[in-house]
Image: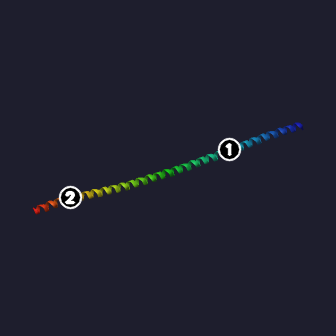
Amino acid sequence: DLVQNKVQDKDLVQNKVQDKDLVQNKVKDKEIVQNKVQNKKIVQNKVVAKNISSDIDKAIVKEIDKAIDIEIVQNIDLVKAIDKDINKNIINMWLKVFDNFWDKLVSVSYD
């Protein structure tokens, strides 16, 4: 009986060892799951970061587009102002020519 009890005790010890192995396996499984969760979070963070980066890029492009549009409008206004000045100069030139012609015509008629 003693021998049999010792054999049973040995079996119990082996069972406890197996249980310990199972617990260790469960711990490892839990760590694997935690790692997978962390990896998933990392991927999610990368996606969020990429989306933020994309939004920032879009915002930058919008601001550049606005700046270009403003510059185009300013350039158009500048061209219009230059055109007005040119037109004024042309008109003034013709007025001077006409005034000179009129002055000569009047002076000739009085002579």
Q: Nearer the viewer, residue 69 or 40?
A: 69
Vertical placement of residue 56 versus 9, above or below: below
- Residue at point 63% right, 46% down? 38
Badge 1 amino acid? Glu
10 Å neighbourhood of mark 1: few (<14), some, or many (≥20)? few
Q: Quadrant of the C terminus?
A: bottom left
Q: Is residue 2 above or below residue 30?
A: above
Q: For mark 2, does the 10 Å Cα neighbourhood hold few (<14), some (14 to 19), or many (20 or more) residues?
A: few
Label 2 secondary element: helix
Q: 15 or 48, which lies in front?
A: 48
Q: Which mark is residue 1?
A: none
**Figure quadrant of the N terminus:** top right
**Mark 1 residue element:** helix
Front tag of 2 and 1: 2
The residue shown at (39%, 53%) is 71
Write down the residue under mark 1. Answer: 31
Relative to 74, 20 lies left or right: right
Query: Taking 11 as reference, is 47 left or right?
Result: left
Q: Earlier in the sequence, mark 2 or mark 1?
A: 1
> Number of numbered discs present?
2
Q: Residue at x 74, y 43 (%)?
A: 23
Q: Place residue 107 in its image quadrant.
A: bottom left
The image shows residue 74 at horizontal and vertical percentages of 37, 55
**Amino acid carrying mark 2 in the image:** Lys
Q: CA distance from mark 2 to mark 1?
A: 95 Å
Task: Give the numbered dot on residue 96.
Answer: 2
**Residue 47 % position (x, y):** 56, 49
Which residue is pictured at 19% across the width and 60% down the height?
A: 99
